[in-house]
Image (tube, coloured by chain):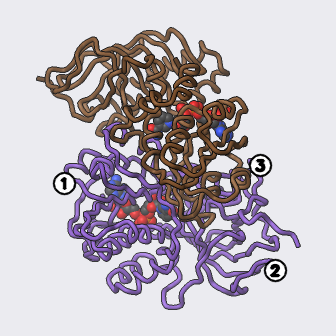
Chain colours: A brown, B purple
Amino acid sequence: MTMGCPYGTHRVLEPAGVLPQPAWRLNNDPAIYDNEILIDVQRLNIDSASFKQISDEAGGDPGRIAEAVLAIVRERGKMHNPVTGSGGMLIGTVRQVGPALTTDLRPGDRIATLVSLSLTPLRLEAVHAVRPEADQVEVTGTAILFETGIYAKLPSDLPDNLALAALDVCGAPAQTARLVKPGQRVLILGGGGKSGLLCSYAARRAGAAEVICFDYAEESLARARRLGAAHRYIRGDARDALGVMRAVGEKVDLTLSLVNLPGAELGAILATKPTGTIYFFSMATSFTAAALGAEGVGSQVEMLIGNGYYPGHADLTLDLLRESPALRALFEELYA
Amino acid sequence: MTMGCPYGTHRVLEPAGVLPQPAWRLNNDPAIYDNEILIDVQRLNIDSASFKQISDEAGGDPGRIAEAVLAIVRERGKMHNPVTGSGGMLIGTVRQVGPALTTDLRPGDRIATLVSLSLTPLRLEAVHAVRPEADQVEVTGTAILFETGIYAKLPSDLPDNLALAALDVCGAPAQTARLVKPGQRVLILGGGGKSGLLCSYAARRAGAAEVICFDYAEESLARARRLGAAHRYIRGDARDALGVMRAVGEKVDLTLSLVNLPGAELGAILATKPTGTIYFFSMATSFTAAALGAEGVGSQVEMLIGNGYYPGHADLTLDLLRESPALRALFEELYA
Ligand SMILES: NC(=O)c1ccc[n+]([C@@H]2O[C@H](COP(=O)([O-])OP(=O)(O)OC[C@H]3O[C@@H](n4cnc5c(N)ncnc54)[C@H](OP(=O)(O)O)[C@@H]3O)[C@@H](O)[C@H]2O)c1
Ligand SMILES: NC(=O)c1ccc[n+]([C@@H]2O[C@H](COP(=O)([O-])OP(=O)(O)OC[C@H]3O[C@@H](n4cnc5c(N)ncnc54)[C@H](OP(=O)(O)O)[C@@H]3O)[C@@H](O)[C@H]2O)c1
């Protein structure tokens, strides 16, 4: 038996000794170790902050976006955007299951990986289509899942691409369900986005007294209004910290930062009670801007790094789509 | 009266509309607005991650370190290291108090600012001395404190430079006192450093069942041993995630990440119980590496962004030095 490290360090090419996520380059050879899973990849959901950065760089041109994705994966052996540091996830079909694994997965099973593309060995043969409205790309290629890598079998009652879109951000609604206490006031920056819609619904469901949806484009706010999970809708720029604070008025108990671009830390801080909590899910969050920004305005606000994992997060999120026809309709329209 | 924004946006030169912390460049003109305080600066304590980066870049040469500090302040109007994103703090003498402020500060009062240098308008005439062992530089210059900027009067019973060193990191022991629950096991990465010594003492005092001090250099570990606040001392590299995990053994309830260089996120994650907490105080912490790293190994660990502010943090920290002769002796030797 050739056993790899359960965390995948055996696939790290450089720098030596680190884990696959912080590594610069991974070995994406499809010949698997006995405790790995080989996946035929069908579609990538690129993290929103990463997709936006690549798309802006490519002037929105699908051909150049495809090239940029191929170039990153060729260079790093994984879809790990070097500018934003973020990844995304994938769906595909299991081709091979290492004999040393105890799992109910079989070749032919359709799965979504629940670990970031930023640590998943990936080899791409081609990008067939770019779907900018969903941050997704259709590809032919192979990926490796390590022994500790988590995944979800694709449900039969939801379209694959819809499941992919929802599972990409499933940590956020799960954390929302955990963090919102009944009666609290909750601000959602980027509330009209993909995770924003799920989190608005989850916050309302958890008994929030007021859910405030804050977003930039009228179109995104219109989406959130159609869902109707929020109590208040504010159009504004999350990067304008004083503007966010003034528009929100009385400070909230909990803020979720779900925007896909840098510079939203101080708006979240100024709009939240000093005794409140901020959940930074945005991959464009700057650690220093948050830590020093809060100190700079004398706020003791508790700030959480948006861990993408929470036990049961995948099922919880898919169940929200099953429970709410309005949420599901929006997701089908946007992503399926 | 010419009133400035309480948060200091009137001093932002570029980009327009943001707060002073994320801003690229501030107006450091010593002519104050009516709600500002002008300080004659005597000494800067540069954030450890920032000082290390500058010192490494300058090959450790004091003259080149001084030049680098002057260059950053000339370019940005503040001591905001563009590579690490972090600042530090300062001590000096109040020269002028804006007439619109209600404060008991008077010209001639000696204070330390408790807001980061990364948001403090600063003008330097000269750097007189570099003290690498303390991350401090002696300077002549002026700084501005905004209406919302917090500060501490320098105590009369402790040497100024010792107070400066301790106050630079006073958020960490205050958070430690808040986070440690009696009976918990606590890992301190960088436990022999400045904040490490304070936090070890604070964790033991809060009733930790086991305090584990993890550090790189034998010298730093020897310091921690002299203090004797930890129960166990481990020599290792915090960037070797699997090494940290193995050396610690049974996972801890709480990890404090206090190292001054990048790449320590995964060690903290793997050494901490999935139901535990990590407090990232290190300014070299990468948001994405922490968020995606935890997800990648399927750990739901709660990760806090090290907010430098907590009510009463300055007094709490100075009181630790007053309470413990061993801690005070170490700090006097190192920083006074
Ligand atoms: N922590 C994790 O594990 C994890 C996992 C997946 C994703 N993420 C991150 O979570 C964030 C949200 O992802 P998503 O898929 O929900 O993204 P999304 O669908 O693109 O949503 C982002 C939302 O933010 C809004 N927005 C952008 N700029 C804004 C501004 N200046 N002011 C106000 N709103 C603004 C966008 O509105 P417009 O369209 O109107 O501009 C959009 O509605 C991203 O940063 C992503 O990187 C984190
Ligand atoms: N959040 C905030 O508001 C705030 C405020 C101030 C400071 N900080 C940050 O807090 C951190 C600690 O500051 P400090 O003043 O306590 O710094 P410090 O005195 O320089 O301590 C850092 C410690 O980390 C150790 N270390 C360095 N590399 C290591 C490695 N690879 N493995 C294990 N240990 C290692 C150092 O050991 P050796 O000397 O043996 O290498 C040193 O003992 C810094 O990152 C600083 O930027 C944050």
Look at mark 2 in the image and give the residue it sits on: B99
- Chain of the residue where label 1 is placed in the rendered structure: B
Look at mark 3 in the image and give the residue it sits on: B16
Residue drawn at x 20%, y 66% is: B232
Is B167 placed above or below A206 here?
below
Q: Earlier in the sequence, mark 1 or mark 2?
A: 2
Q: Earlier in the sequence, mark 1 or mark 3?
A: 3
How many C-alpha atoms fall within 10 Å of the one at disc 2: few (<14), some, or many (≥20)? few
Between A306 and B203, the one lying in front of the other is: A306
Q: Earlier in the sequence, mark 3 or mark 2?
A: 3
Q: In the drawing, what numbered circle is on residue B109? A: none
How many C-alpha atoms fall within 10 Å of the one at disc 1: few (<14), some, or many (≥20)? few
As drawn, the residue found furthest toward the left would be A1
Does residue A84 show up? no
Q: Secondary structure at mark 1?
A: loop
How many C-alpha atoms fall within 10 Å of the one at disc 3: few (<14), some, or many (≥20)? some
Q: Do pointers 1 and 2 mark residues of a single chain? A: yes
B19 left or right of B30 in image:
left
Q: Secondary structure at mark 3?
A: loop
Residue drawn at x 48%, y 17% is: A70
**Residue B309 location (% of width, % of height):** 53, 67
Question: How far apart are the alpha carbons under marks 3 and 2?
Answer: 27 Å
Ligand 2 visible in quadrant: bottom left
Look at mark 1 in the image and give the residue it sits on: B250
A30 left or right of A232 in image:
left
Q: Do pointers 3 and 2 mark residues of a single chain? A: yes
Is B138 placed above or below A198 here?
below
As drawn, the residue found furthest toward the right would be B1
Q: Amino acid at mark 1?
A: Glu
Question: How far apart are the alpha carbons under marks 1 and 3?
Answer: 50 Å
Q: Secondary structure at mark 2?
A: loop
